[in-house]
Amino acid sequence: MEIKVQPLHQRNIDDVLRLQKTAYAANFLEDADSFLAKIAASPSTSFGAWRGDAMVGYLIALSLMTNEGLDLNTSNVPTVPIREARVMYIHDIAVNPEARGLGVADHLLQRLEEAVRGSAISLWHLVSVQGSQGFWEKRGFEVSSDPLPNGYGPEAVLMLRR
């Protein structure tokens, strides 16, 4: 069955919360208000992936002016139009464990790259958690010594791609 990637909307919050619980340890779970604020701030850079009628993955990314990132579980989210942004911050990507190996994450990332094409984005930024550093390195990201946003824990790794 084909993976279909579409813009993520606030009406998808229940699916996002459900998927989040399948992908992350309890200390990384964010509440609905946090997700709703991020989705509202990033309508052109947040996507869901569906297989049939079931959401099997999501990606939430925000266009920013600096590479400060966002604290975990915050609703205080800057709104920077993509045409004015210099940094793309991938805040969260999650894939249902039953859909791993189907290329869901790469479909989501490809859609984000398409959304950013033609903009002034010159830096990509994310916080790698739960041992995902190798996944991101395969996609061109490198470890950064810059300080991490708050809430991600001692094993988190800040990663950048220029």
Image: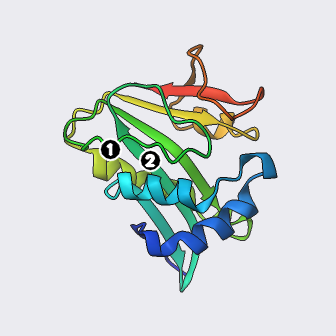
Mark 2: few/some/many CA within 10 Å (<14, 14-19, 20+):
many
* 1 vs 2, front mark: 1
Mark 1: few/some/many CA within 10 Å (<14, 14-19, 20+):
some
Residue 111 visible in the displayed image: no
- For disc 2, the marked residue is 61
- For disc 1, the marked residue is 79
Left/right of residue 35 with respect to residue 61 in the rendered view: right
Residue 151 % position (x, y): 68, 34
Residue 106 % position (x, y): 51, 54
Q: What residue type is labelled 1?
A: Thr
Residue 147 % position (x, y): 59, 17
* Residue shown at the point (64%, 61%) measured from the top left: 95
Q: Which residue lies furthest to the right in this view?
A: 26
Depth order, front residue of 17/104: 17
Q: Which amino acid does label 2 sit on?
A: Ala
* Residue shown at the point (64%, 36%) measured from the top left: 128
* Residue shown at the point (64%, 66%) measured from the top left: 17
